Amino acid sequence: MESNYDSNSRGALIVLEGLDCCGKTSQSSRLLSFLEGLRHSVESWRFPDRNTGVGQMISSYLANKSQLDDHTIHLLFSANRWEKRSLMESKLRGGTTLIVDRYSYSGVAFSSAKGLDFGWCKALEMGLLAPDAVLYLDIPPEKAAERGGYGGERYEQLEFQRKVAKSYQILRDASWKIIDACLPIEDVETQLRKIALDCVMTCQKGKPLSQLWSVN
Ligand code: NYM
Ligand code: MG
């Protein structure tokens, strides 16, 4: 019996990554409106998810209201993704596309920029769902700093962001889509729309879910 229904049909996991102030958050919401406008089932997520208990500990650390050992905060960031894993999987399998502002790559890039072992940071992410697309909004750290949006949170300093940019370069693989984030906001948006739509269509047709750290 032939059927048009493909059990692998699902929503797409689309991740936006980049330095602080690269424009991820505004692009995520633009992308959300675009896909909603096309009547796709879509949600916008972000990590850290500050709404959970773990997320509140992270938020307080980022606001310099609490001090934590570097490994400990790394574990919390990772736990914050693990606690959302099953919901993420059910949303995707249910056909909802997720646009996710930061994911495991931020975890590895920021913590390894502090000097934590790269392999150790990556290991904790093993088994989380692998994105169908990683969109990296590429901006020189100096340009991001000029945007003046650093909100006084921990990590939002030029010297540190330079290190994070280097870590992202090590993490990057051929599947990442690198977008020049210095372009006008509408041009960045146009590029993201195209990549995201392709990705949504591919997943709708049927694509098995995979896990980190597989290469797409
Ligand atoms: N961050 C984010 C990490 O250090 N590790 C992680 O796993 C994640 C998801 O949190 N400077 C850092 C990057 C940001 C900060 O994120 C808060 P945002 O997107 O600026 O609210
Ligand atoms: Mg920030």
Image: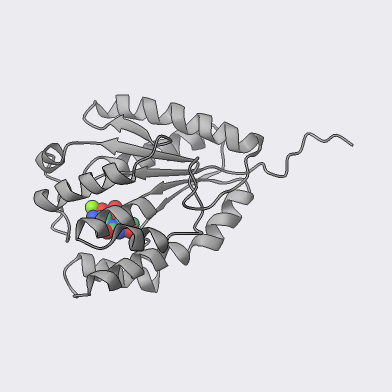
Q: Quadrant of residue 53?
A: bottom left
Q: Can residue 209 be seen in the rendering of this structure? A: yes
For residue 36, above or below residue 74: above
Q: Is residue 180 left or right of residue 52?
A: left
Q: Position of residue 135 (x, y in %)?
A: 38, 38
For residue 158, above or below residue 127: above
Q: Is residue 98 left or right of residue 114?
A: right
Q: Position of residue 189 (x, y in %)?
A: 35, 29
Taking the spot 47% from the left edge, 59% from the top edge, the residue there is 126
Q: Position of residue 114 (x, y in %)?
A: 19, 60
Taking the spot 24% from the left edge, 40% from the top edge, the residue there is 22
Taking the spot 72% from the left edge, 44% from the top edge, the residue there is 7
Residue at the right extreme, as displayed: 1
Q: Can residue 103 be seen in the rendering of this structure? A: no
Q: Quadrant of residue 3?
A: top right
- Identify which residue, 89 or 45, lies in the foreground: 89
> Please, which colouring scheme is shown?
one colour
- Please state, as top left, top right, bottom left or bottom right, where the N terminus lies in the image: top right
- Identify which residue, 142 or 38, lies in the foreground: 142
Disc count in the image? 0
Taking the spot 58% from the left edge, 49% from the top edge, the residue there is 92
